[in-house]
Image (spheres, rainbow, N blue to C red):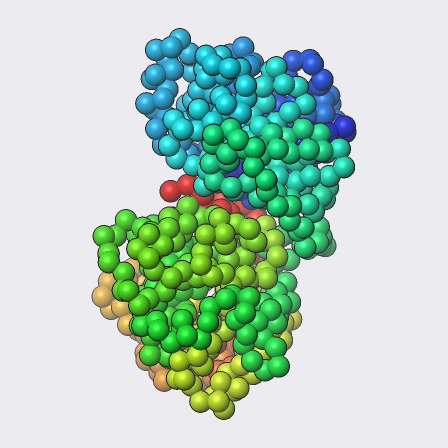
Amino acid sequence: MCGIVGFTGNKQAAPVLLDGLAKLEYRGYDSAGIAVRDGENETEVIKEKGKLRVLAEMTDNGKAVKGTCGIGHTRWATHGEPSAVNAHPHASDDGNVIAVHNGIIENFQEQREKLIKKGYAFHSQTDTEVAVKLIDYYYKKYSQLPIEAIARAMVRIRGSYALCVMFKDYPGEIYCARKDSPMIIGIADGESYVASDVPAILKYTRSVYYIGNMEIAKLEKGAVTFYNIDSEVIEKPLTEIKWDAESAEKGGYEHFMLKEIHEQPKVIRDTINSVVTDGRVHFDSVSLTDEEMQEIEQVYIVACGSAYHVGMDLQYVIEALTSLQVRVELASEFRYRKMTLHRKSIVIVISQSGETADTLAALREAKEQGIKTLGIVNVIGSSIAREADNVFYTLAGPEISVATTKAYSTQLVAGYLLALQFAKARNEIEEARYDALLAEINTIPEKVARILEDKERIQWFSNKLINVSDSFFIGRGIDYAIGMEGSLKLKEISYIHSEAYAAGELKHGPISLIENGTIVISVVTQTGLIEKTISNMVEVKSRGAKVMAVTTAGNYFLEDTAEFVCYVPKIESLFTGSLSVIPLQLLSYYVSIGKGYDVDKPRNLAKSVTVE
Ligand code: G6P
């Protein structure tokens, strides 16, 4: 959570910082601040509670702040309420050290008390102020060398951090340190940049360095030097970013979410094409061999949020196509479970950002037990991508809206291809069925596009949800997994209380909550289970619920039970999730904007949850 940006060069820094922070606002948006230095002059610190636009107004979009070296921050509060005092940057009382931070310092209380004994005073409730003062303490106590002071503080600090620090004695320089929180460093002619994520600097440069865990960097105008924790200089490779800058802009759409919903046909196609050539799935880029796939007996899919829902869907697909056993786990639970993993297993972690703290910890836990790991990841060079044994990159491009849509869809299709490849490598699928399933996967982009063409019907229906306070999503099998995602989408951006239930579970509790006008959204695509779910729809309808259904074209009889039916094109049953989720994404979007909410930045949420 939180976004950080830094710049040193020859142009005015503040507009660059504000521009970069705007691209990172999805990471947090309860307060924001910048610190900019004009040559040898005092550093100017400006920070305020509220969204970035407040800071932009205070500084005339940065134009009013002089100086060519600075750091900026957009915050998602962890320690201390959102306020100007708790907003970053934080500084030592004499302005010797000024820093912004993303992450959590777990032992901040203990370090704070030690520093108070040394005479330091604290003004905010943040853990960041502790880091700043600890660096200041070591700087003054020892050699007055920034790298050494930071390295000493890093040894004392437990937790996660991406830190950008400026020192009074070193104008024009920014020092960065990282452990388990994302941070990239960009370089251009006479200019250096640092940011939590690529979109923040993409406008200025495509040449980036990935700073590793427990490493430090010194940024000067157009030059970067890297150090390890022993303050020794280390070399890092320069990487070229291939994304185009436009994919991180709204491109004519009113909101990022709507733009990203519409990008789905293309990014699903790109993800398929990345591993399918000549009618075959090739996993060279994933580097998982047929022999490895043959040996595996157990699959664990571990993820958070929507990525977990992808896993919920994939378990049905993998188990239907192979003899593999699949367990789907929430990363936050998995990481603390005292569980001996099956020796012949693979842990598949799914993550858009590749930085979700719990998912990363789960991956490390699996590796510690010596289990093979595979990451389905969107962000190239992210921590999970770097640490997993094998990586299947989804090609969703930058996803800005906090509520995921296109990353979810690419993860799902990546999972289908993985399931198919497992079946093939293990000789568990006939050639003709393999060809037929791959052909079906290839129809998904065009079928998603068809659903999007008919979005006005869903927009019309969304009005019926504007004033409701409770809703339920029901379904069986894959339809249940999609209901979970639909329910999460609705609650996270429209703030309507929503629960997803396996339809068969309704009678075990939730039916007691059904009363006149309760909304029940039913996903009904799984041949063989349709009649059973219809019975559940009838049960809730007879108790006053307003029932909506998402089903496959041809199932017109659902109109007898549901007040509103949304049809998706026909497709092989195993892959219906890719289609039935689309109307649910659109529904949530329209309800949210209908209620006048900030759909791309829902309250209390952040796009990457890099803290526990
Ligand atoms: C947050 C996002 C979700 C996402 C989840 C997991 O809650 O809002 O959209 O599904 O984190 O994130 P990841 O980056 O690991 O996929």
Residue 43 picture location, percent across and down = 64, 17
Task: Report the side of 576 relative to 509 (left or right).
Answer: right
Q: Quadrant of the C terminus?
A: top left
Q: Is residue 231 above or below residue 546?
A: above
Residue at x 36% of width, y 84% of height? 528
Residue at x 72% of width, y 22% of height? 67
Residue 574 picture location, percent across and down = 44, 78
Say how many tags the image has: 0
Q: Is residue 252 above or below residue 455?
A: above
Residue 124 picture location, percent across and down = 44, 20
Q: Is residue 250 above or below residue 176?
A: below
Task: Report the side of 209 relative to 104 (left or right).
Answer: right
Q: Is residue 511 visible?
A: no
Q: Quadrant of residue 267?
A: bottom right
Q: Residue furthest top?
A: 119
Q: Is residue 257 above or below residue 502?
A: above
User: Which residue is at the front of the view, 475 or 174?
Assistant: 174
User: Which residue is at the front of the view, 288 or 124?
Assistant: 288
Residue 540 picture location, percent across and down = 33, 70
Q: Is residue 223 visible?
A: yes
Residue at x 38% of width, y 26% of height? 156
Residue at x 44% of width, y 24% of height? 152
